[in-house]
Amino acid sequence: MNEQSRAPRQQGKPYRRPKKDPVRMLAFEALRAVDERDAYANLVLPPLLRKAREKGDFDGRDAALATELVYGTLRRQGTYDAVIAACVDRPLREVDPPVLDVLSLGAHQLLGTRIPTHAAVSASVELARVVLGDGRAKFVNAVLRKIARHDLDEWLEQVAPPYDDDPEEHLAVVHSHPRWVVSALWDSLGGGRAGVEDLLEADNERPEVTLVARPGRATADELLDALGEESSLPGRWSPYAVRLSEGGEPGAVEAVREGRAGVQDEGSQLVALALAHAPLEGPDRAWLDGCAGPGGKAAMLAGLAAERGAVLLASEKQPHRAGLVARALAGNPGPYQVIAADGTRPPWRPGSFDRVLMDVPCTGLGALRRRPEARWRRRPDDLERFAPLQRGLLRSALASVRVGGVVGYATCSPHLAETRAVVDDVLKHYDGSAELVDARPLLPGVPALGDGPDIQLWPHLHGTDAMYLALIRRTG
């Protein structure tokens, strides 16, 4: 018998079932919902986390990691797509979306977190085995090992064009925004490279959770006392704002559960406050929120109106959103009314109101910190779709306010086509019977408000969403 025949036969490794990692499974499920159903992560993730906690799968650290994986992957999707494209032998459009989601999650762990390389790769491959099967898991393993050869800065040198060759594309890849969004934000902000880079970086940071103490129902001091110094900070600009420390859970705050407080970005609070404090000529009894859903600004305005003996009418076109408005206003100390109505064809008589807020539907480019997936869904032609509606709603608002009254035109977008272009275009047709009011003095202490008379807030300058506000007084 020769040596070869005496050697023991090589045995294959026994098959090992993949282990389900509840954190990464949840993150993958959230990304698939965002991709398949056009869902928003800020709406999908909380119920998934709540369900995981109820099952006993999660503790606080697990929830924090899952949240970082989902939001970090979505924010950096453009950058990670460029890196992944450099590591595969086919166009990304030919990679199945679930595979691309696993690869993106793995890329974020490798390039955007402190998770050790071997752990990031092995956990991602294990996830791929569970949700994709062993065959495609081998593809995921090969791609992630290529990605792991370089850190993020090294990859950016490879996949982003030099700034001097193509400034907008360089910023788009480095800061993970579509090129057209980079161009639009740069035009709106003005200035040089430093300012727009600060803005793009701010869009990729996790925003603070900010609460609003609803006037007449709670105060900021009460919220601060209830939360304690370790869990909260006062707002930067709004006297009704309270900022939660990292990891703070709004649903755990008693005042939020009772409706006396709510979650509301400080920029939205400032818009409502500016309209409420704008000087009027004549009575101040009837206020209108003409696009009130989901009710944050309406709740604030209703409380401020009640303090002056005024009444707010909150109108929202979509009945289910009108229901959200009614829920937000429930418990207001003074009278109010909520209706479902189309703001472009209102049921109320012209000139019925002293103050009108029209916070119009828009692209939402001012809230990319909170809804990072919106940057990948929006297209330039969305501006054309919103334009007629925005102009129609502003014309309706000006028709709804009496002579001497004030309209606030607001939008959560800094895009010039949704802000100054709308206001300028509509005011051309009023032949001196409506004029802009300088809104800047109505936000005392808030810096960097520009040349006026309108206001544009910025994430990198004010720590808020990029809210826009123009105040217009009817003069005839």
Image (tube, helix red, strand yellow):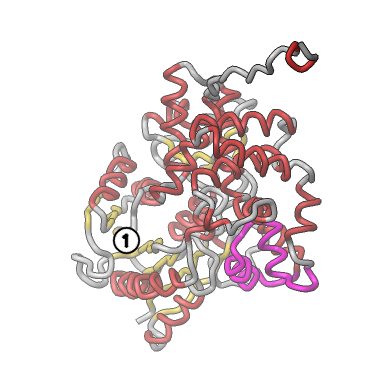
Residue nearest the viewer, comparing 455 with 34: 34
**Residue at which label 1 appears:** 290
Residue nearest the viewer, comparing 164 with 317: 164
Q: Is residue 174 magenta?
A: yes
Give the prevailing secondary structure in the magenta stretch.
helix
Query: Residue at the bottom extreme?
Result: 431
Res. 461 in view:
no
Q: Where residue 248 sits in the image (x, y, percent)?
A: 56, 30
Q: Is residue 228 magenta?
A: no
Residue nearest the viewer, comparing 150 with 233: 150
**Placement of 399 over or under 303, stated as above or below:** below
Q: Where residue 16 sits in the image (x, y, percent)?
A: 57, 19
Q: In the image, which residues are magenta? A: 163-192
Mark 1, residues whose alpha carbon is within 10 Å: few (<14), some, or many (≥20)? many
Q: Where residue 415 sits in the image (x, y, percent)?
A: 54, 69
Give the residue at x 41% y 51%: 38
Res. 270 in view:
yes
Residue nearest the viewer, comparing 394 with 236: 394
**Placement of 153 over or under 437, stated as above or below:** above
278 sits left or right of 191 in the view: left
What type is the residue that disc 1 sits on? Gly
371 sits left or right of 321 in the view: right
Instruction: Give the total of numbered labels.
Output: 1
Figure quadrant of residue 140: top right
**Placement of 421 over or under 458, stated as above or below:** below
Secondary element under disc 1, as helix, strand or loop, is loop
Figure quadrant of residue 176: bottom right
Q: Quadrant of the N terminus?
A: top right
Query: Residue at the front extreme?
Result: 1
Give the residue at x 48% y 54%: 273
Give the residue at x 49% y 55%: 374
Q: Where residue 163 sits in the image (x, y, percent)?
A: 78, 68
